[in-house]
Structure formats: structure tokens, C-alpha cells
Amino acid sequence: MNDRLYIFDTTLRDGEQSPGASMTKEEKLRIARQLEKLGVDVIEAGFAAASPGDADAIRTIAESICESTVCSLARANERDIRAAGEAIKPAKSGRIHTFIATSPIHMEKKLRMQPDQVVEAAIKAVKLAREYTDNVEFSAEDAVRSDIDFLCRIFGEVIKAGAKTINVPDTVGYSIPALWGERMKQLIERVPNSDKVIWSTHCHNDLGMAVANSLAAVMAGARQVECTINGLGERAGNASLEEIVMAVRTRKDVFSCDSRIDTTQIVPASKLVSSITGYPVQPNKAIVGANAFAHESGIHQDGVIKHRETYEIMRAEDVGWKANRLTLGKLSGRNAFKTKLAELGIVMESEEALNAAFARFKELADKKREIFDEDLQALVSDEGYAAEHERFKLVSLKVCSETGEVPHARLVITDEGQEQPAQGDGSGPVDATFKALESVVNSGADLLLYSVNNITSGTDSQGEVTVRLAKDGRIVNGQGADTDIVVASAKAYLHALNKLHTKLERAHPQV
Ligand code: KIV
Ligand code: ZN
């Protein structure tokens, strides 16, 4: 159908390629459930050949998701395609997305293959993928710097071999809208049987034009857009799902198509992805930034009060901003808690995990009278970290911070169950806490990022802290949440250390 725009979300694959954003199977599943609620057509759940753990996460998502197609990425080789095919097997609707680079620089320097060999590999890959599913997508990596005649040739061949979606990526974020639209138009006009496939675009944001380029491709006839929540992705990120969806929906006068996205699920999806990956959303980010619907200047406020549409082109509630809805309180029981988790798409692995989370909820409700959806998401994440990566755990923390005095932290952690006391001074309470932690763990890791965000509004809100550490070429993000931001900071630091201690052998699809 020409008026349907398919949304292909790659938060769990391209988004996960952002430094430190790697997610556990449970975290991926939580995001996949939210993407399903959002109504995305295709969830790219990962790259199965990266590791057995990645394949397992895709399989679990394929087993659990009914309303969206579940897809695995695969390079154009037999091993990758078989891994992808096996991983998506349980899906009600599964897709294999295979790709190979087509630009002279990638073919010569990365693949060390001749163009004829690249075409041959692409045809073979698509044919093999078709043995697993009818739903095969082919991408020409670095299409932006590829020769258009070569693209026409390879696309024509993979369509003959059975590809149903043809994706044109701007892998390095190099294009500009007029050129990208023109490229898509040329391809649709010149490739034989182009009307038998869905044309797709996949744009990176290195020059800040991923969304504009994607929309130009849609205007030229593309009917699938590959994008991520919050524009998460390698380097400057991918095209942002929320911006594409809202641009197309808001400018119906310009676009002759629309998606089936339930836009009221956009903000919850944004918050979930931000909280799980530790990538905060900038306040002035379109659609999902905290200021996106805030009117600061008196003139604007006056206009909005008199007539909303003077300055608002979208309604905050239509994208899922709502006045923080009270979710649960101190007196809520275990059943209400369980029901609310289910509503949020959170399934606890066991009764034991549910009991532990409920105990944490009661503790939190003692400190903070009103508990919102975001608090529950953070609480479940925190519980998950504590359960999964157990080497270091925070037992207690005392910090003295007084005007004119050097801040001092005294703490106890467990290392493989053994209690270890430590203390340290610092320029502030967080610095003192991190120094105390390092004095006992001696990780030698570099602190690349420290950020604090309040989960909801108000000074009794939980602070959500992200700590990014780097060691031996590995980058990890740790998160922690607590009403006390120094405690949240210590938890985040330990979470990152625990991740560093978890061995992870994974292949990167594009290296
Ligand atoms: O950016 C890119 O080219 C990709 C492909 C694997 C589709 O992510
Ligand atoms: Zn990409």
C-alpha cells in the first residue's frame, strides 16, 4: 500500500552500537515490548552472529512479540544468515536483514572484494535467507558513497533473488536532503521490478541531517524508514523515530503516507530507552525533550493561553506527555504492584524477583509518597542490576559534606560476598565516594561520563545517575537510581564495574 509508511526500529541493534549502550536480554525484552505497544512494524532485535547471547536475546524477543515483525541483522555470509535464521525462527513474523558494502572505499579497503564478487555474495545471501523466511531485506552499506549504476545493478539482482525490502543507507551521515531524495527517486525509477519491493532509507546523523534526509527519501517514494528511539546510535546517532513519525503525522498536507504508530507511547518509549541505556535526552530535543512543550517567554505563554495553536503545532498529550500520573502509593499492595508492572510490560522472572522488587518499592514509598511509572521502571532496572552482576554490591555509605571542610566518604561494599570497608576524600561528596570505591576495587578505569537526571519532578524525586567507564578499549555505562543521589552515584559506579568484569566477546557487524 502506497500510503502506509513502515517504521523499522533499530534501537536494539544500531542503537546498541552506541558506546556503553549494550543491554542485557531482559532490558532488550522490556524495550521490545514497549516498541510493540508503540506499534512499530519491524523491531531489529540485534545481530545474531555477534555472540550466542545476542542470538538468545533475539530468540527470546521473537518468542514474546506478536504484533511486530522481529528481525535480525546478518552480513552477507552463510554463518551470519544461518545464525539470524535460527534466532528469528520462533517469531510469528520474522525477517532477515542482510547487507554488504557497495562503495568503492568499503569494497576495496574493508571487504577486499571486487564489485562482481560483492554482487555474487549479495545474491547468495538473499537466496540463503529466503530458505528461512519470505521476508528478506537487503541493504547496500555506504550507499551514499556508492556508484548509482552499481547500486542499480546489485539491487536489481537481489530483487530477482527474492529480497522484498531494499534499504538505502547513508551509513556515514554524509548526504543532504535534496541529494538523498534524488538518489531514492533515481533508484526507484531505474531498478527493474522496483514496484515489487518496499524501498527503505537508513540515515545517520553525522551532519545533523538524518531526519531531514529520511523525510526527503519518503517524499521520493521510500515507504520504510529505519530509525531509533531518541535518535540513539553510533557516533551522532540514527534518524530519530519520534521526529520522523511526528513530522509525517503533523504535515499530512505534505506527506502522502502515514505510519500506524500510537504516538501516545512515544514519551514512555523515550524514557525507557534513556533509562536503560544511560543516554539522557537533551531538554531541547524535539518531541521528547523536557522543554519540547514548555513555553518560557511571556509572549508565547500568553498566546498559548489565548489559543493553543498560536505556538503549538502538536499537543503534548498526543505524544505521551501527561501530567505525572500517580501510579502507586505507600498503601498499595503486592497485587496492585504486580498489575502495574504488567501494564508497563514488565514481567518478573520469578516470585522471588517480584518479592524483592516489591520490598524495594515499599522502601521507596516510605521515602517518596508518590510513585510514578518512571520510578517503577528505574526500580526494576536497579533490581535487575543487583541480581545479575553480583561481584560488587553496596552495603552502606556515609558521606560528610560541610562548608569549609573536605568532603569525606566512608562505605562498605561486598566483593564476591566478602565485606570490604573503604574511605576517601574528594572535591565533593560524589568524588569522595568514587575515590573510596576505587581505593578498594582498584579498577584503574577511566571515568568518561558522569550525569544525574531526576526521574520525575520535585526534590523528593529519585536521581538517576549514569557513569561511563572505559578500560582496555571497552566502554560500559552503569546506572543507579535512588532518592539520595550520592547513593545512586555509588550504585551506578558499581554497576559499571560489574559490567567491566563480565567478559563479553561480541562481533561488530560493520567492522
Ligand atoms: O548504517 C548502516 O549502513 C547500517 C547497515 C548495517 C544497514 O547500519
Ligand atoms: Zn546504521
Image: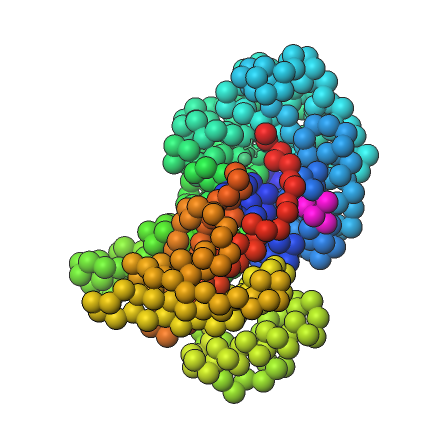
Q: Residue furthest left?
A: 299
Q: How is the image coloured?
A: rainbow
Q: Residue shown at 57%/79% (left/top)?
A: 359
Instruction: State which quadrant residue 105 falls in.
Output: top right
Q: Quarter-wise, where is residue 10 in the image?
A: top right
The percent position of residue 209, horizontal first and vertical second, equals: 40, 35
Left or right of residue 4, residue 352 in this image? right
Seen as rendered, the residue at the extreme bottom is 331
- Is 150 drawn above or below residue 38 in the view shown? above
> Is residue 259 in sight in this rendering?
no
- Find ligand 1 in the image and state its quadrant: top right
Instruction: Tell me: 191 left or right of 294.
Output: right
**Residue 361: x, y in percent?**
53, 77
Is residue 66 or residue 173 the one in the foreground? 173
Q: Which residue is rendered at x = 70% and y = 23% of the image?
A: 122
> Could you tell me which residue is drawn at 54 percent across and 30 percent down?
169
- Quadrant in which residue 484 is drawn: bottom left
Instruction: Tell me how many marks there are.
Output: 0
Chief SS of the magenta region: helix
Depth check: 310 or 168 in front? Answer: 168
**In the rendered view of the protein, which quadrant contains the N terminus?**
top right
Q: Report whether residue 154 is seen.
A: yes
x then y, percent, for residue 508? 61, 35
Quick one: 490 or 122, which is closer to the camera? 490
Relative image position of residue 148 (x, y in whole percent): 54, 17
Q: Quadrant of the C terminus?
A: top right
Magenta range is 52-56
Q: Is residue 484 left or right of residue 19?
A: left
* Placement of 419 over or under 24, stated as above or below: below
Residue at image point 65% right, 29% down: 99
Magenta-span inclusion, residue 209: no
